[in-house]
Image (cartoon, rainbow, N blue to C red):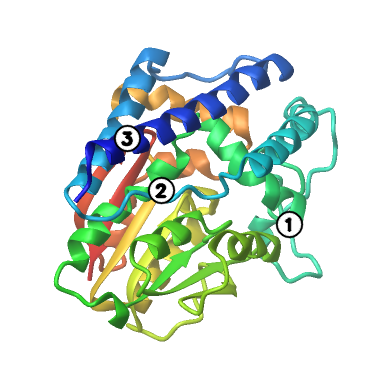
Amino acid sequence: MVSALDRLGYAARQTARVAWYASHYVAGRRILKPMPKPDFPVGPTPTRAELTADMRALFTREWRDIEAGLFPAPRPLGADPGELLRRSLRYFRDLPQVDARRHGLLDDEMPPGRQGDGLPDYYRQNFHFQSDGWLSEESAALYDTQVEVLFTGAADAMRRRAMKPIADWMAGRSQRDLRGLDVGCGTGRLLAFLHGAWPGLRLAGLDLSPPYLAEARRLIGRTARVKLLEGAAEALPFDDASLDLVVSSFLLHELPPDIRAAALREMARVVKPDGLVVIVDSIQKGDHPAWDGLLDLFPHYFHEPYYADYVAGSVEQWAADTGLVPAATERAFLSKVVAFSK
């Protein structure tokens, strides 16, 4: 049972997060020089009030699910005040370099192409204009702050909406008998939330970046129930129909079309016939037409080389092409969550 005090505690934590990261967003706007206006058509965009109201609705839905007993209230991840401050300082120290890349004044772009480290061609880029792409400890330490600032404190809540269809699917199942995988787990935040909600689950996280996997281990802690593996989404190191649950958050829009299709085929291959696949990623054109202009602008301002192609398509259709069947869908602020059965 949850109490009124639990509800107040949840609300206070989310309010504090939003205030913290919104203040970073406002301060960052004063540091970053304005980008040139786009020279292409831009669709409709929401007002700040509309965005704020929609974000509040996201937190309201999560609390209702917690209150209904679908999953526990999330524990704060990396919320130590000293750590938050250190990451904040890192974020602002890196902003001038990000701004220089945005304006073409810093030529340290990692060109996509085959390198001696064996990483895929598409992977070696400064996505989001961030320093070192995905390939350094500094990048891994900066990433979560960068994403939360971008979404003014709502990124974790969007990821956690994957837990609603998982909770529905888990009903009547013993979590200790189930195996799950997070594809492109990055710094491990969704993995940490899943492990916190269902500690009996045997989970694996797979990512191409050793520094990001190291950050995930630090965040999750030492536990035999969560294994971390270095590997690519388009070549999952698992047998056919060997996993009960496959999740992925904010990965597909970072992949070129052929790799994205291969990654979805791999997810469909490794999940069992009675299993579940849950994708969390950006909304796409038509999911919320009044916000389509945000999708036009995002790759212009944030160096997302494959995003325009992603938003022009349909996750539901791409997954259906692999034999997966849509089971549930939800728009969660600027993301959408789609669950599939097989």
Q: Quadrant of the C terminus?
A: bottom left
Query: In front: 254, or 30?
Result: 30
Residue 67 against residue 326 in the figure, above or below: above
Query: Type of residue at label 2?
Result: Arg
Q: For this rendering, which residue is in front, 205 or 21?
A: 21
Instruction: Looking at the image, tell me whether mark 3 or mark 1 is earlier in sequence order.
Output: 3
Q: Residue 38: image x %, image y %?
A: 58, 18
Which residue is at 38% across, 50% downward?
A: 74
Q: Position of residue 279 (x, y in %)?
A: 36, 55
Which amino acid lies under the numbered mark 1 shown in the image of this protein?
Leu
**Local SS, label 2:** helix
- Left or right, 149 with reference to 67: right
Label 2 to label 3: alpha-carbon separation: 12 Å
Residue beneath disc 3: 59
| Residue that carries the numbered disc 1 in the rendered image | 135
Picture disc at residue 79: none
